[in-house]
Amino acid sequence: MKRNFLSLILMMFSLALSAQPKISLFCDHVESIAQQEGISFREAAQKIRSLGYQGLDVSISLSEDKLKILDELGFQHACAISWMDYYKGEQKELEDQTLAFMQKHGYDRVLVVPGFRPGNAPKNADQKAYARLKKFTERANALGLKVMVEDFDNPSSPCYGQQNLDKLFQACPTTEHTFDTGNYLFAGDEVMPALTHFQKRISHVHLKDRLAPGHPSSPAVGTGVIPMTAVIQSLQSTGYNGWYTVEHYGSQQMLTDATLSIRFVQTALKAKDFPQTEAMRPGMSEYWNPQPKLVIPGADASAPSDAIVLFGGKDLKEWENDKGEAAGWKTENGILTVDKSKGDILTRRKFGSFQLHLEWRIPEDITGESQARGNSGVYLQDKYEVQILDSYDNPTYVNGQAGSIYKQTPPLVNAMRAPGEWNTYDIIFTAPLFREDGTYLYPPYVTVIHNGVVVQNHTAIQGTTEYIGFPRIVKHQEGPIRLQSHGDPSAPISFRNIWIRNM
């Protein structure tokens, strides 16, 4: 009798736990927090656990030592993630690795990213990819494991938008769906109709917000344009009791976003319990912590309190040449002048996303024309050039004039000052994020303000700056700022007041 009673209590407790809303985060985000905050992976995971995240979505390539840390901290196994390019053929080795990972570490579901359709793919490429996914799904199902695909934000994906997913699910009837709230909008579909359409197939949810339709950034949940509360309440009304995984890839303030996101999700999950007669109060949508860090602005264009001063008028200790030696440009009276015999100079430090301020001047007695007149440039992450040139009264190709993304995007307007006067650039750069195959998950973006005038407005950079040929996509990490010593015969230009803020 006692044993039956205990069994009943345990069963009721288990059912209560399974009915509780479960909130997860991408393990990649934990790694980003560790990097951004300058702390260990364990410390970052502890912070996430203390916020209330119960589980993590984890790549099957995560190291054993990190998996052990997550288990020690009590994280539940929300979902495994595996990238399999079924357009390249059978993926037997990776499938074996995936199933072995799931069985060893106790994951009952895996999100499969099934590859991307190449530009020269034959007509039956999708059908072959579907068949491979179907075969793997059936193999996993036989082991009691779920296989899922999500709506993906790449037009080359077989999971791009509702129409493509319908074809995939028709070919793979037991493959389930991870519903990503942000990617339907990206593909031009409405979120709520898609939710209704795929309701019976959804077994996992990614809560991704968007700043605007087609915008690549993923802000804190509830701060963008996705009707998140409606999505969550709609899911609850259908009896969904699976995981809600928060996502904001590309964030430069991952810990803050993770904090805001879970508070929003917790509130939205509880919203159904509010008495229907109770009016919405202002405090229900207010967040008081964490408070933004205090930054003291500089006077005029001088550096704010959290900036790294790259050139303040005295020395070039932050710079070096291509050989890693001391930079050889001239400094006099607080001004840095290009020495064309010494070549380019680069910052010793490397940067991801940032705000950069610099001032530059074309000599008053400048000579030459087109590209041979005060030519220089500032390279972001040593890959992407914002052009510097005398464009005051100097016709040239428009994607090579001052304020252009060189050989890519002309400036919106010409905001150039006359030779002898100082120009300012304020550059806001968002670093790219790459997929495992080296393609962009989202490209680098740049906003350039030239003399107080916006000349590039959140412009997508197509790839590296090439003098001959077209931009290339080169997978990379952080990179230095480079100032160009151009080989044209005109007089060298000067710089002053250069500072940068990490974002």
Image (tube, helix red, strand yellow):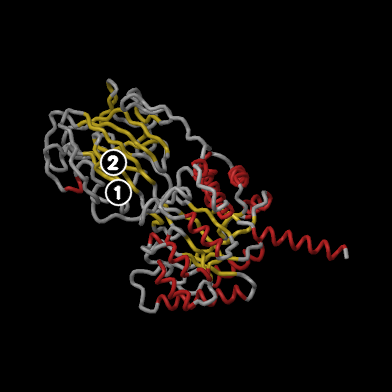
- Using the image, determine if residue 242 lies above or below residue 127: above
Q: Residue 449 appears at what percent x and percent y?
A: 27, 38
In the picture, which quadrant includes the C terminus?
top left
344 with respect to 281 (left or right): left
Please give the name of the residue rendered at 15% of the width and 32% of the height, measured from the top-left corner.
Answer: 418
Q: Residue 395 appears at what percent x and percent y?
A: 12, 43
Q: Residue 238 appears at what percent x and percent y?
A: 55, 65
Q: Which residue is mark 1?
A: 459
Quick one: label 2, few (<14), some, or many (20+) residues within 10 Å?
many
Q: Residue 77 appears at what percent x and percent y?
A: 63, 58
Please give the name of the residue rendered at 31% of the width and 51% of the height, measured from the top-left corner.
Answer: 460
Secondary structure under tag 1 reads strand
- Mark 1–mark 2 Cα distance, whole angstroms, equals 9 Å
Three-letter amino acid code at the position of disc 1 = Thr
Numbered-mark total: 2
Q: Is residue 173 visible?
A: yes
In-front residue for pair 84/1:
1
306 with respect to 451 (left or right): right
Quick one: label 1, few (<14), some, or many (20+) residues within 10 Å?
some
Q: Among all residues in the image, which is located at the extreme front?
A: 277
Three-letter amino acid code at the position of disc 2 = Val
Q: Is residue 27 visible?
A: no
In-front residue for pair 439/184:
184
Q: Which residue is mark 2?
A: 448
Q: Among all residues in the image, which is located at the extreme right?
A: 1
Q: Quadrant of residue 402?
A: top left
261 with respect to 384 (left or right): right
Q: Are marks 1 and 2 in contact (CB under 8 Å)?
A: yes
Secondary structure under tag 2 reads strand
Q: Sequence-wise, which precedes: disc 1 or disc 2?
A: 2
Please give the name of the residue rendered at 16% of the width and 43% of the height, measured from the top-left corner.
Answer: 371
In the picture, which quadrant includes the N terminus?
bottom right
